[in-house]
Image (tube, coloured by chain):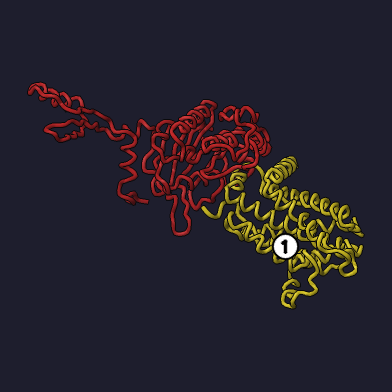
Amino acid sequence: MRLFWHELRMQQLLFWRNRESAIFVFVFPPMLYLLLGAVYNGTIDGFPAADVLLVGLLGYGCANTAFAGLAITLVIRRENGILKRLRGTPLPGTTYLSAMLVSTLVVFLLQMALTLLLGLALYGAQGPENWTGLVPVVLLGVAAFAGLGFGAVSLIRSAEGSSAVANLVLLPMAFLSGSFGPTRNYPDVLQAIADVLPLTYFIEILKDVYLRGEAFWSDPGSIAIVAAWGLGGLLVAWRRFGWEPRER
Amino acid sequence: MSTAVSVRELRKRYGALEAVRGVSFEVARGEVFGLLGPNGAGKTTTVEVLEGYRRRDGGEVEVLGFDPGRGGSAFRERIGVVLQHSELPAGLTVREVHRMFAGYYRRPRDVDEVIELVGLTEKSGARVKTLSGGQKRRLDLGVALVADPELVFLDEPTTGFDPSARRTAWELVRALRELGKTILLTTHYLDEAQQLADRVAVIREGRIVLAGTPAELIGGTPHVEIRYREHGREVVVETNEPTRVLAELAGRAVAEGRELLGLEVRRPTLEDVYLDLVDGEPGEATS
């Protein structure tokens, strides 16, 4: 436990000290919310636009932080030998990775608070209908997207390409899943693709809890799909994850 | 318990490439042991097996009484590792990086003491990304020393250094030796092995081709070279009896009233021995 807390503190220090990752991971989603919130107003599907967009960008933020941010950071640390160096210390690998997971959760919680604050203060958002229900939603989302992130780390070979690959997956997914606005008018093909993406279902769960005030478990099918994606990522990581640079 | 590292018939292959082909050596506690060889000889592979990074394919390995592959945290508490290529978090300061690593050990050394030992006190508040190459290498060493390890692995600690940075690094290794640490270093620089190591093993194509103290390695070839110029041509005499040969040559020259121009008497350096070994016919050793 002592090692875990130490490593969590170090992960936080490393995250906030790295300006690029702090801006890209932490600032970018709330910034998009500021922009989109200024464009849309009125209601979407009977809910205030400010809240619908907020939900979409919380979904995007969760995937951006736990999937893309985590994957890019880990690939860079692996390729420049920091992970290998850490394996030479008594710090167990599982402690390192779980500290990283919890650190990611901390970052996303802060980001969520910031986004909510912007929505409530600037765009007249109503806020979540079910506050306590948000807790398990956030835990599920961070865990599942981090699982996918760990899987992605195992498949991405180079540090230079990590950001491009992660965003090549993330941005289309976010667009198709309705992070940036309603997808009702998208062509059928795109909607069909969206129907298999984890972010679609994660946003669905967020909508249930945040907009409709339903219980977290009101849509077990969506929960199962999000969890399955996360487990799939973990399975890839379990088979392929490595601590040493791939390109050397 | 006077042996820190014991390696017997170590073998390691990567696919078709047999990187290490039956290497054996021992390192005593408190000793500086040098693995010397050209690039690709199997030095890093050997050391990485000892550090616990790689599984061996054959042979026996014992490091501080542990099998490095199974030693786990208890083993890693007691070793310090300086890898050939590895970076440290660029955004942290020198002191923060030391603190970070100190936190991984049960009984770390005082962080500021270590920073002073590696000569980075003035830089302790500076971000890692602002350090020079030599300073980064000292940081690597400092991070390996916060564990207060009994055994320190240095994989090519001065590759790419300018001469003065190398001198400084050598002083550091000597200081570690004074502290009673056992040091296993790899290098492809001869002078480094000669300067630092109590004993040296020359490794080539995955085999140890020569081992001993630097003096023994040179002493292994008894001959001395006598060079001089005669009628505008350089004459080289290799002999096991330099005193007699030189007396004869000098006697003749004095009798004829001429000078032995450019007279030079030299014992081969470790470099000559080394170059003979690593440039020799490949693969003549039997497995």
Q: Amino acid at mark 1?
A: Leu
Where is residue A20 drawn, in percent x and y?
67, 49
Q: Which residue is mark 1?
A: A231
Say what secondary structure mark 1 lies in: helix
Which colour represents chain B?
Answer: red
Which colour represents chain A?
Answer: yellow
Q: Residue at x 36, y 40 (%)?
A: B210
Camera-nearest residue between B284 and A165: A165
Where is residue B273 drawn, in percent x and y?
32, 38
Observer able to see residue A140: no
Toward the front, the furthest residue is A39
Residue neighbourhood size for the residue with mark 1, other residues' Cα within 10 Å, grouped as few (<14), some (14–19), many (≥20): some
Please identify the quadrant where the N terminus of chain A is shown.
top right
Using residue B266 as the reference point, say whether residue B274 is left or right of it.
right
Q: Residue at x 45, y 45 (%)?
A: B43
Using residue B179 as the reference point, say whether residue A166 is left or right of it.
right
Which image quadrant for residue B118? Answer: top right
Q: Residue at x 63, y 57 (%)?
A: A163
